[in-house]
Image (cartoon, rainbow, N blue to C red):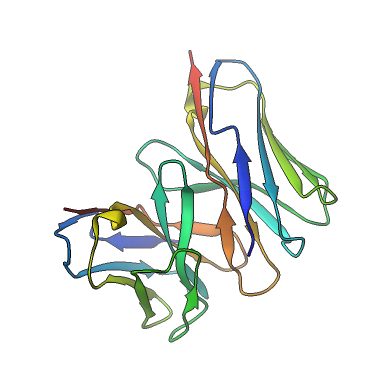
């Protein structure tokens, strides 16, 4: 079945820095890749997504890149703020069954 | 915004105990999911369902049963709880891929 690997497991940066979070998946049938953010003690919330017929998507300070050939995604966060401190998860969804598999998460800490 | 409500928020039981975690969503989503979250493992899929009476096996189903009684309600059952099932459990619902999560149930098995 689908497996999703996410790196790095943790990041510590100073406010204003940019960060890059990488994910790779194994099942070429996966077509939809939403990302979620989990602030301390809170539920996961959707932040950005991309479909397999796209290469890039941007919203505010988030840019999501997708390489179908290498089965790789990367989330770029610019001008980080302390409020960006959270765990970030990538996920992959296949065409049938709507089975959603998550990466292991990246814990981001942004210091003021 | 989709509303997903889990209960209880916290639960403590003993080894061998019987536990039921409840999840209700109010947006008529077809898909509902149960995940467990553990440090170093992220979210792991236990069971999911695409409608009342339907159940699909996830990636870590051992020791868990689930039942989808209505479009809104999805239950996770631990009939003989073990310490390895101590975890944070999340329920989620979906209409077309994006998941809406509940606030989680923290389960401790002593």
Total residue callouts: 0
Can residue A59 be seen at all in this image of the molecule? no
Residue extending farthest to the bottom is: B53
Which of these two is toward me, B17 or A65?
B17
Q: Classify A61 as above or below B47.
A: above
Which quarter of the picture shows residue A94? bottom right
Quadrant location, the N terminus of chain A? bottom right
Which of these two is toward me, A108 or A71?
A71
Can residue B89 be seen at all in this image of the molecule? yes
Q: Residue at x 50, y 68 (%)?
A: B58
Q: Position of residue A77 (x, y in %)?
A: 65, 29
Q: Residue at x 47, y 56 (%)?
A: B44
Q: Residue at x 70, y 58 (%)?
A: A32
Q: Classify A50 as above or below A81.
A: below
Q: Classify A8 as above or below A4.
A: above
Q: Position of residue A93 (x, y in %)?
A: 65, 62
A24 relative position to A111: left or right: right
Q: Residue at x 61, y 41 (%)?
A: A6
Q: Position of residue B25 (x, y in %)?
A: 40, 68
Q: Classify A32 as above or below B17.
A: above
Q: Position of residue B95 (x, y in %)?
A: 57, 68
């Amino acid at each position: 079945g689908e497996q999703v690997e996410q790196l790095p497991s943790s990041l510590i940066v100073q406010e204003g820095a940019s960060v890059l979070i990488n994910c790779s998946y194994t099942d070429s049938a996966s077509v939809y890749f939403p990302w979620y953010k989990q602030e301390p003690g809170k539920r996961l919330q959707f932040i950005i997504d991309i479909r397999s017929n796209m290469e890039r998507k941007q919203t505010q300070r988030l840019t999501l890149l997708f390489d179908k050939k290498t089965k790789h995604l990367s989330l770029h966060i610019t001008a980080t703020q302390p409020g960006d401190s959270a765990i970030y998860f990538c996920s992959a969804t296949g065409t049938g069954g709507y089975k959603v598999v998550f990466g292991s998460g990246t814990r981001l800490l942004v210091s003021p | 915004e989709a509303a997903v409500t889990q209960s209880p928020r916290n639960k403590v039981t003993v080894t061998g105990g019987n536990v039921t975690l409840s999840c209700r969503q109010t947006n008529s989503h077809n898909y509902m999911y149960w995940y467990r979250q553990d440090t170093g493992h992220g979210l792991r899929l236990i069971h999911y369902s695409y409608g009342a009476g339907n159940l699909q096996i996830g990636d870590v189903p051992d020791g868990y049963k689930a039942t989808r009684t209505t479009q809104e309600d999805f239950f996770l059952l631990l009939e003989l709880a073990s310490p390895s099932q101590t975890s944070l459990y999340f329920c989620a619902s979906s209409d077309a891929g994006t998941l809406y999560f509940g606030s989680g149930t923290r389960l401790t098995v002593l």
